[in-house]
Structures are given as C-alpha cells and as structure tokens.
Amino acid sequence: MTDLRITTTGDTDTILEDVVVQELRASLHGPLLCPGEAGYDEARKVWNGMIDRRPALIARCAGVADVIAAVKFARAHEVLLSVRGGGHNIPGNAVCEGGLMIDLAGMRSVRVDPVRRTARAEGGATWEDFDRETQAFGLATTGGSVSHTGIAGLTLGGGLGWLGGKHGLSCDNLLSADLVTADGKVLIASAHENADLYWGLRGGGGNFGVVTSFEYQLHPVGPVLAGMVLYPFSKAKDALSLYRDFIADAPDELNTIGALLTSPDGVPMAGIAVCYNGDLAAGEKLLRPIRAFGPPLADHISSMAYRQVQTLLDAAAIRGRRYYIKSSMMQRISDDAIDTLIERFAAVPSPLSLIALQQLGNAANRVSATATAFSHRDALCEWACISSWIDPQADDMNIHWARQLSEVMRPFVTGSDYVNQIGLETEEGSERIRAAFGANYDRLMALKNKYDPTNLFRHNQNIRPTA
C-alpha cells in the first residue's frame, strides 16, 4: 500500500503515511476500506443515486469501540469526517469527498423489552429492522413512512411518521441515546443524564457526535386501517381540497399524506394515503368521505399489519434512483397553494416524481416548540417535492423543475424546512439551515460550542460553533 491523499477539516489536501492508515486499520474490528479495495464502491453508495462522492477511507464499524477509534483518528489528523447510518440520507451528507466516512450500516441490532415497552437499536438499523423486532411483541413507535429509512437520521432530524397523531414524532419517543463525542468519549443522553444534549439530539441532526444506539418508548400497535385512495387528475383540485378539510378535524388515531403522482402506466393522479391506528370500525366510518368521493380510480384501504403499512410507499423510494428534494413546513393549505401544485405537477418531467403533503399529527403538534430541538410544532404538514428520475442526462431538467416549484411555493410555506431534507451548508446556504432550526438555533449553537467546538461533525446540516 502507498501513502494516502486525504481531505482535511480545513478543506485542504494532505498525505497520510501508509503506517498511519495501517494503525487505524489494525485498531478496528470492522474493515477499513480504501479506493480500489473490494467492497469500497458499494460502501460509498447511498440511497440517492445522485451522490457520487469518494471518501479516502471508509470505516465499516462493527461496534462502539470502532466508532471511538475512527473519531479519535479523524480528530488527531484533522481529517474531514462524515457519518452514515443505515438508511436513505437523502441529501448525501453521509458521504464526504476525500475524507473519512464512519459507516454504521453493519450495526443493526434491535433489543426489545416488552415489559417496559422499550427498545434499544443500534445506529445503523432501519425501521424495517426495528419494526420486525417490536411487532413481534405487538409494539411499535413512530418511524417514518418507508421501511428502509434509517432510524438514526430520521430521529435526529425529528421523525414524521404514520403514528405521529397518537404518539408524536420519532424524537418525541426517544428515551435515551449513546453518543460518541468529538473527543472520543461515550456519553448517555437522557432526561436524567446530559439533559442538554438529550434536548439537542431530538431534532438537531448529527451535529453533536455519532449516536451508536437509540432507546425508544414503544406503544401497543395491532392491525391498522391503512392504504391509499387514488383519484383522476382532472379532480385533483377537489381531491386536495377534500384532503385539507378532512385533516382539519383528524383524530389522534389518524395520520395522512396527500399527493400528486403518476401511475406506473404514465397517468397523473391525485391520492390520499392514510393510517388509522385505533378501533377498525370507527376507522371505517371516519374514512368514508375520502373513499366515497369521486368515485375514486382505486381504493386500496384495508386492515393490515403495521409492518405492511411501512412498506406501502417503498415503491416510490427505490434505492439507486436519482433524487432531488425541496420541502418546507406549511401551517395551512390554501386554494392558491393547491392550484399552484396542480399547475406545476402537470409539467413534471419525470413520471417517478411526486408531490406530497405529510401531516405532522396531533400529538406532534401538542409539544412545545422549545421542548425539543425540532421546532416546527405549529405546522400542519410538511410539503415536499420529490423529484426522481433514472437517466443522469436528465439531471438539469428535473432539478430545475423542483427548484422552480419551490420558488413559486414560497408564499404558501413557513420558510422553515424539515432539516432531514436539507443538504450541506455549502450547497444550501447557512441561512436556510438556520431557519430550519427556527427559534432553537441559538440554544443549539451553545450545545455545539460545548460538545463540538472545533466542528469535527460538520458534514451535515451544520450548526457552526462560535467558541
């Protein structure tokens, strides 16, 4: 092996002698991958096929000791560092160019305590891993809406999901977390230990360290009434107006997504997806208005296991496709907003793209804006434009469509984005990231000064320290 060129935290290149790299390799239980080695190209890929960065080193951690060793190495040699969990990482922050990527994808264990109704999961687990274990005991917690989403990224950014109306966001159900900080120490963050850090982890993103395990509160969740109703695009305005009115008085048991999408045979449609977590007979009665309207093109609502609900949207989130996402929070869905979405979707360049309005949920709304780092508690829903395509030659037109739509939607949104959808500061701008954290930004910056004053963990929706 030869000496290795690597990117530093100062955005310059330096050379690491081979002996230094071999010392890191020997300190890890999991493999350390360099460009050209077996497994490297697969390890650097994330869900979004747009991301094509090449780390100089990838530490595929087998446990907490590996994470500590990798963090200490990055700090000692001032190496640019990124952290990958086990799921999507939509903007690709998990992969750094020329630095060291800490990869937790092999750390996926989930241990359930059915008596206390808690579960502890490692940082590389996906919600599919998590739900498989918890549902064996008839338990679950709020965990997104696509099964192969990672628990880490979703929770650290807030965590919208199908159970949010009754049980709040993923971060609202986080009881504790084990974290490797920038100085290589392992801290427990909970309401009783390092409570300031616990507050920051619930919505502050990956700014404070590497979370190696998450402990969640679980809830009894049996069969639910869920699925999607589809309507002709000619009735999209009426369908989205119905959606807006329908969720205005939604009970805690219900969470929803309103959407504009294209069928597999190329037909544009409107849709309403639902998950009712309560008495099934009551749910049938509640959902009649959206099932009777139209009549619909298709009604796929039925009683199903919660694990099946988590897979309903998987076909719209295929790994390896190219994705570009714009989103923001909305407090209300106006007629003008509906008209704008329909007009712009009619010109969508890719049939794989969609527009979604994902409801936060009543329980999520009842939490104070400052109780956790996730501050968007007054939002009705997250609006998201998910531009998706396959051909790299079509990048410009699909990105342009999403950006234009985001611009014309500005009058109808809060101007504060869901942090999980935002890219790096160098790509998005510091003001957009600051706005995503809202009124909690200054408190988060104080935490950054305390736990990561040199900004080792910067390859994220970054909160710059001032210390």
Image: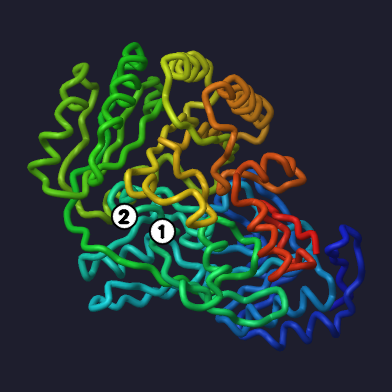
C-alpha span from label 2 to label 1: 8 Å
Mark 2: amino acid: His
Instruction: State which tag comes first along the sequence, 2 or 1.
Output: 2
SS class, disc 2: helix
Q: Is residue 364 left or right of residue 179?
A: left
Quarter in which the N terminus is drawn: bottom right
Vertical order, 52 against 289 (above or below): below
The quarter of the picture where residue 85 lies is bottom right
Taking the spot 64% from the left edge, 51% from the top edge, the residue there is: 441
Q: Which mark is residue 4?
A: none
Q: As rendered, which of 336 and 228 lies closer to the eye?
A: 336
Q: Position of residue 432 (x, y in %)?
A: 67, 40
Horizontal arrangement in the rendering, residue 288 relative to residue 162 (left or right): left
> Dividing the picture into quarters, in which one does residue 393 lie?
top right
Report the residue at 70% width, 48% height from top. 424
Task: Mark 2 and mark 1 in contact? Answer it, CB < 8 Å.
Answer: yes
Q: Indicate the amino acid at tag 1.
A: Asp
Q: Is residue 228 left or right of residue 383?
A: left
Q: How many tags in the picture? A: 2
Q: Quadrant of residue 147?
A: bottom left
Disc on res. 167: 2
Quadrant of the rendering where the C terminus is positioned: bottom right
Mark 1 = which residue?
172
Residue 277 position, x and y percent, is 21, 49
The secondary element bearing badge 1 is classed as helix
Q: Residue at x 44, y 50 (%)?
A: 368
Instruction: From the viewer's side, name the closer residue of 148 and 455.
Output: 455
